[in-house]
Image (spheres, rainbow, N blue to C red):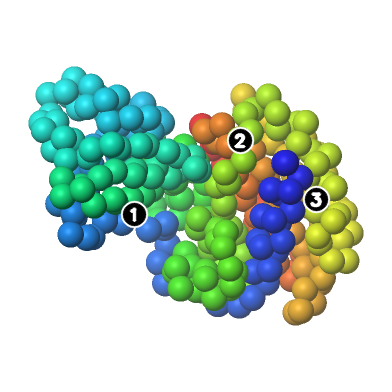
């Protein structure tokens, strides 16, 4: 199971490797509030689940759990009555999906992203080069020269989902991408996943030449590092992938660039790792 998931993710991630271009903004987009005929009540839900996430560092599992939280905060919970037969699910650590029936009986589904930062979560973030995702659960510092890719650019580069949750590019063709997966993986299983990931890379990556593959301690967590060369339509590229568990599921940060810029790519990877904080 883990191997099949990894193979799919790797194949689609590497499909977007080493293409030029950059965007003009320097930090991930804030979650977009839903816009629909039920916009007003869904906006209230958006704010409520975001407050819950920032306080509990996880998503609510039901309307009842969210209602109890809101009541404890002395907030009005009457709007939650409009979410009948609601089910909450979190297919990926940074996403909450709510399926419900509107007061008119129409089936509805809305998804929310975890807020990038939470009040008091960290002193980092005043500088636009300080990346914060999932309420400050993932933080790192962007090296100089990188800027956030817009959604349309990501779709153009990666061609098909699953797309990265965020990606940054530099003028020399180096790309940093982060992806939160749906594979359940807790910290105790990370080291065990090393060999499966090695086999998965070898199965799908053309012209793979290993430079490094290891499981290593990372604070109180465990992290995997895979470094390898591979072929692309533009030439040989260098890839450095850091993988770990976040919220009980797999996530990865990939640094990719042309092999003739290998020193720069390696420096970017080391810079990201040295500034990386993972809750």
Q: Disc 1 designates what residue?
A: 30
> Would residue 229 be visible to someone looking at this image?
no
Residue for point 37% across, 30% down: 61
User: Left or right of 117: which side holds 212?
Assistant: right
* Nearest-to-viewer mark from 1 and 2: 2
Residue for point 18% across, 20% down: 72
Residue for point 61% across, 77% down: 20
| Disc on the earlier residue, 1 or 3 | 1
| Disc on the earlier residue, 1 or 2 | 1
Camera-side residue of 141 and 115: 115
What is the spatial separation of the Cα atoms under label 1 and label 3, in whole angstroms?
Answer: 33 Å
Q: Disc 3 designates what residue?
A: 200
Badge 3: how crowded within 10 Å, few (<14), some, or many (20+)?
Answer: many
How many discs appear? Answer: 3
Q: Position of residue 24 (x, y in %)?
A: 42, 72
What is the spatial separation of the Cα atoms under label 1 and label 2, in whole angstroms?
Answer: 25 Å
Q: Disc 2 designates what residue?
A: 184
| Disc on the earlier residue, 2 or 3 | 2
Helix or strand or loop: what does disc 3 sit on? helix
* Nearest-to-viewer mark from 1 and 3: 3
């Amino acid at each position: 199971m883990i191997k099949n998931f990894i193979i799919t993710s790797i194949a689609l991630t590497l499909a977007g490797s080493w293409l030029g271009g950059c965007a003009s903004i320097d930090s991930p987009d804030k979650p977009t509030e839903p816009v629909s005929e039920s916009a007003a009540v869904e906006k209230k839900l958006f704010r409520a689940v975001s407050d819950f996430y920032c306080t509990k560092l996880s998503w609510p599992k039901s309307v009842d759990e969210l209602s109890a939280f809101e009541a404890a905060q002395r907030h009005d919970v009457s709007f939650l009555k409009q979410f009948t037969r609601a089910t909450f699910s979190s297919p990926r650590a940074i996403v909450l999906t709510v399926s419900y029936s509107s007061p008119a009986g129409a089936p509805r589904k809305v998804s929310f992203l975890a807020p990038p930062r939470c009040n008091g979560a960290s002193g980092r973030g005043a500088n636009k080069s300080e990346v914060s995702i999932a309420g400050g659960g993932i933080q790192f510092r962007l090296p100089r020269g990188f800027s956030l890719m817009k959604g349309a650019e990501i779709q153009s580069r990666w061609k098909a989902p699953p797309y990265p949750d965020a990606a940054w590019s530099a003028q020399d063709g180096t790309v940093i991408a982060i992806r939160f997966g749906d594979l359940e993986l807790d910290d105790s299983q990370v080291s065990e996943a090393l060999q499966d990931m090695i086999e998965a890379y070898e199965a799908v990556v053309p012209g793979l030449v290993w430079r490094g593959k290891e499981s290593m301690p990372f604070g109180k967590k465990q992290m995997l590092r895979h470094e390898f060369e591979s072929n692309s339509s533009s030439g040989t590229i260098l890839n450095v992938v850091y993988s770990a568990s976040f919220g009980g599921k797999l996530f990865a940060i990939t640094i990719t660039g042309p092999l003739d810029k290998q020193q720069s790519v390696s420096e970017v990877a080391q810079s990201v790792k040295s500034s990386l904080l993972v809750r």
